[in-house]
Image (cartoon, grey):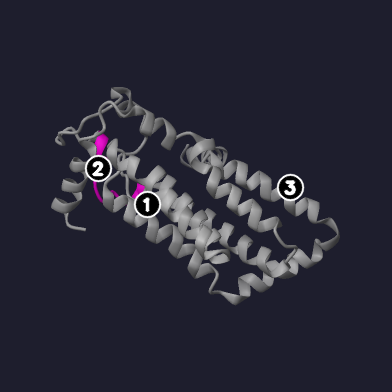
Amino acid sequence: MSGNLDQGLLLALNSVAEGNMIVWKLANNALFRGFPIFFAVVALWFVVDCRRRRSRMLVGLFAVCVATILSLWLQFHLTVHVRPILDQALPLKVAEPQWRTFWDHTGSFPSDTATLFFALAAVVFLENRLVGFFCFLWVTGIIAIPRIVFGWHYPSDIIGSFILGSGCVFSFNKVPYLRMLIERMLTLFEGHMYIVHALLFLFLAEASNLFLSLQEIGKYLAQMSHS
């Protein structure tokens, strides 16, 4: 996407930011924004006791982790552009001035939040096309677009997130070895599936908060390695 088009779309969407904080609050409410996605993942996991389906879903959830980690790494190491809200040259309508004070990096490509949710929507899409399509629309309208409206991301950040998140899930599921490996692991746990179910719920609970606990551990280890 050209810089002029990217910036033009950003400013056009940002023009409606003032007086619409309820949109931002909904877009960042973990229960509201995540409910359709996580509900669909859990429902598809339990709707049938199918080892093949569950192995596909676990491959997809592994891809979700990889995509989210990559998106964060890219934000820190590949500054395609400065995050809009931090760019003083842009005539943005900033709903909350304090948003400019708590960033530990200036890059915004791609959006880690959108990457994670687009990837989860892709996991759902692989198992149920109709529900998955709804999840993609939900992520786009409820999570992705508000991040442009309020100046946290450029449109190109969101497009990059869609490609990275869904691309990782679709690509990983094309690797038969991964599916076979996880299917064999599920066979080993056949008499103890409650352990797998418990781990799934822990994963989804952490994913709903963008793996913040793991991010903190990663930052701490990075600081330790440079000290």
Q: Residue at x 73, y 51 (%)?
A: 197
Which residue position holds label 2? 82
Q: Are marks 3 and 1 in contact (CB under 8 Å)?
A: no
Q: Amino acid at mark 1?
A: Leu
The reply to whether residue 122 is visible in this rendering is: no
Query: Is residue 50 rendered to the left or right of residue 135?
Result: right
Q: Amino acid at mark 3?
A: Ala
Which residue position holds label 1? 74
> Which residue occupies the foreground of this view, 133 or 1?
133
Magenta stretch, residue numbers: 74-85
Q: Are marks 2 and 3 in contact (CB under 8 Å)?
A: no
Query: Farthest residue toward the right?
Result: 191
Q: Position of residue 6 (x, y in %)?
A: 20, 51
Which residue position holds label 3? 198
**First in sequence: mark 2 vs mark 3:** 2
Is residue 215 highlighted in magenta?
A: no
Q: In the rendered structure, find residue 7 and report the number of the disc placed on it.
A: none
Cα distance in 3D space between marks 2 and 3? 40 Å
Q: Residue at x 51, y 62 (%)?
A: 130
Q: Nearer the viewer, mark 2 or mark 3?
A: 3
SS category of the residue bearing label 3:
helix
Q: Position of residue 61 (x, y in %)?
A: 58, 57
**First in sequence: mark 1 vs mark 2:** 1
Few, some or many C-alpha atoms within 10 Å of disc 3 (few <14, some 14-19, many ≥20)?
Answer: few
Few, some or many C-alpha atoms within 10 Å of disc 2 (few <14, some 14-19, many ≥20)?
Answer: some
Q: Residue at x 48, y 53 (%)?
A: 135
SS category of the residue bearing label 1:
helix
**First in sequence: mark 3 vs mark 1:** 1
Q: Position of residue 141 (x, y in %)?
A: 37, 46
Q: Is residue 185 above or below residue 10?
A: below
The reply to whether residue 125 is visible in this rendering is: yes
Few, some or many C-alpha atoms within 10 Å of disc 1 (few <14, some 14-19, many ≥20)?
Answer: some
